[in-house]
Amino acid sequence: MLDAVIFDLGGVVLQWEPERAYERVLPAGDVAAFLERIDFRAWNRRNDGGHRFADAEAELIERFPDDAAAIRAYREHFAHALTGMVPGTSAVIAELGRAGVGLTALTNWSGETFPVARERFGILRRFTDILVSGDEAMLKPDPAIFALACERAGLDPARTVFIDDGAANVEAAERYGLTGLVFTDATTLRADLVRLGLVGERAAIGRRIFHWALRSEWAAATQTGVYPWSSRGVTYDAEGFVHLSFAEQVADTRRRYYADLADAELVLLELDPDATEVPVVVEPGGGSEFPHLFAPLPVAEMTVHAADWRA
């Protein structure tokens, strides 16, 4: 019986686009050629394996002295290389957790840059352990790293699924004894996990759901099309989902978190969970069960109510 899942992070849970870091110092049209010239993939893999960035940068600068600023740009602007969460995966993680499935992660990532991701993305708190290759000086697909991941988390390989967007890593995991899944998108992943018996079919919510927003922040969202918040003062990235309420929870949420604000400073937003494609998962919290939206709030789909409207 399968009862645990090990997730890769980059390309599965978090979006990683190294080009965005280099675009801080180079014209966007020049970045691809630059990365090919310095053999970025090989250089970065060494860093993921524990090579120190200061040494790695110095070695490249010795070969390409005119590109010193660009070479340093990746580490200096690394936060820009993390462009968000992979759509849908966070909901799958939440559903697995709700089903009692053990959750850990195993990533090829530099130990020097991983703290940037850990601090920014709240979804990572859902893993009981994250093994970072750069901290261990070993890399996937080395079988030793799968053994270490299982040993450290107390996992039985025969009862554990490994998910990665790299086929070579999945094949190595299967040789070690794990059940491997090659990640392409969250919808396919969820279907695979249903087939393996780790989650069930996603049931309809069947109830209206609501979100309190500051009027000023909602006004900005209607202009930009982007609402970056999870709750008051907390971003979607930091929490990993958007806090919502069922109709009977709306008034209490208002009292607990927005009592200092006048009605004129707030709007109440309504979303039909069964008419949207963004995933909603009901989870325990605050002594009750609340709906959580595992995607940015879909601005165009929201119905706006005045704060004194009664659900």
Image (cartoon, rainbow, N blue to C red):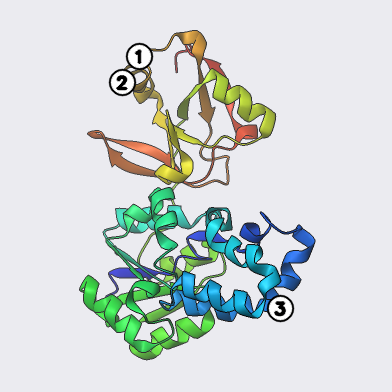
- Residue closest to the eye, 97 or 239: 239
Q: Residue at x 53, y 62 (%)?
A: 75
Q: CA distance from mark 1 to mark 3?
A: 57 Å
- Residue closest to the eye, 220 or 71: 71
The residue indicated by pointer 3 is: 37
Q: Position of residue 139 (x, y in %)?
A: 42, 81
Q: Which mark is residue 259?
A: 1
- Residue closest to the eye, 265 or 233: 233
Residue flagged by tag 3: what amino acid is it? Answer: Arg
The residue indicated by pointer 2 is: 256
Q: Are there few (<14), some (14-19), or many (20+) residues within 10 Å of tag 1?
A: few
Q: CA distance from mark 3 to mark 2?
A: 56 Å
Mark closer to the observer (1, 3):
3
Label 3 secondary element: helix
Q: Earlier in the sequence, mark 1 or mark 3?
A: 3
State the image quarter where residue 76 is shown. bottom right
Q: Which mark is residue 284?
A: none
Quadrant in the picture for the C terminus: top left
Q: Position of residue 206 (x, y in %)?
A: 45, 37
Quadrant in the picture for the N terminus: bottom left
